[in-house]
Image (cartoon, rainbow, N blue to C red):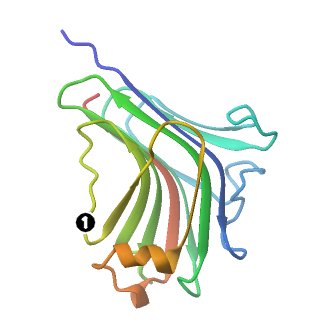
Amino acid sequence: MIKKYLIIILAMGRFVFAGPYLTNGDFEEHLSIGWMQAISGENTTIMRDTSYDPDPDYETYVYRGTGTGFTKLLQTVDIPTTDLEFSVNAKLYAWDNNQGGWSGAAVVISYLNELDSLLGETMICYRSYACPWTNTSTCHIIAATDSSWHDYAFNIDDELVNLNGVNQSDIQRIQVAMFIQSYDC
């Protein structure tokens, strides 16, 4: 019998959009302010504390243990333009030791139309070997190089150049999420 292990950690320092778009993007207030949770499966933790990063501010920690499913902390906002600056300070980690299983941890920026239909997404992520997340015409992968804290920043207009399957003029809303997914771990 093969034991299955999965460790996925997603700790976020802060999300920033130029302008007042995200509510509680720095996590200084309780997570019920501005953020929603979506969970499938068991062995999930979503917490807010000051001990995840050496700075004195609050960060959010999203964890998923063994099994198949996902954990998501998200916020969806209306935007007047895609000419927005996005930045995040994140520590991403995903690991599994089960052949055929996989895991991934990501900051996901989803581009939605007025009906909340998904048009495309950008994933800043750390993935185990067999994770199927890949670049497509509607998904751009920005791979984390290691599991340390890193700052990621870009202009949404500039990022959309990587998503030639997305009609930029159809984007009316953006969803920002901390997302963890695992399969057979």
Q: Picture coordinates of residue 164 (x, y %)?
A: 30, 79
Extreme right residue here? Answer: 56
Q: From what the image shows, is residue 77 above or below residue 144?
A: below
Q: Picture coordinates of residue 91 (x, y %)?
A: 56, 41
Q: From what the image shows, is residue 177 above or below residue 43?
A: below
Query: Which quadrant of the figure contains the C terminus?
Result: top left
Extreme bottom residue here? Answer: 169
Residue linked to disc 1 = 136
Count the marks.
1
Q: Quadrant of residue 159?
A: bottom left
Q: From what the image shows, is residue 124 above or below residue 39?
A: below
Extreme top residue here? Answer: 1
Q: What residue lies at 37% left-to-right and 30% top-to-bottom?
A: 95
Between 153 and 5, the residue placed more toward the observer is 153
Q: Which amino acid type is marked by label 1?
A: Thr
Does residue 35 appear left or right of residue 66 in this picture?
right
Q: Picture coordinates of residue 92 (x, y %)?
A: 50, 41
Q: Quadrant of residue 7?
A: top left
Element type at marker 1?
A: loop
Query: Which quadrant of the figure contains the N terminus?
Result: top left
Q: Picture coordinates of residue 128 (x, y %)?
A: 32, 36
Q: From what the image shows, is residue 175 above or below residue 183?
A: below
Q: What residue lies at 19% left-to-right and 26% top-to-bottom?
A: 99
Q: Can residue 183 be spotted in the picture?
A: no
Crowd band around label 1 with a 10 angstrom C-alpha radius: few (<14), some (14–19), many (20+): some
Between 45 and 170, the residue placed more toward the observer is 170
Q: Can residue 140 be spotted in the picture?
A: yes
Between 168 and 74, the residue placed more toward the observer is 168
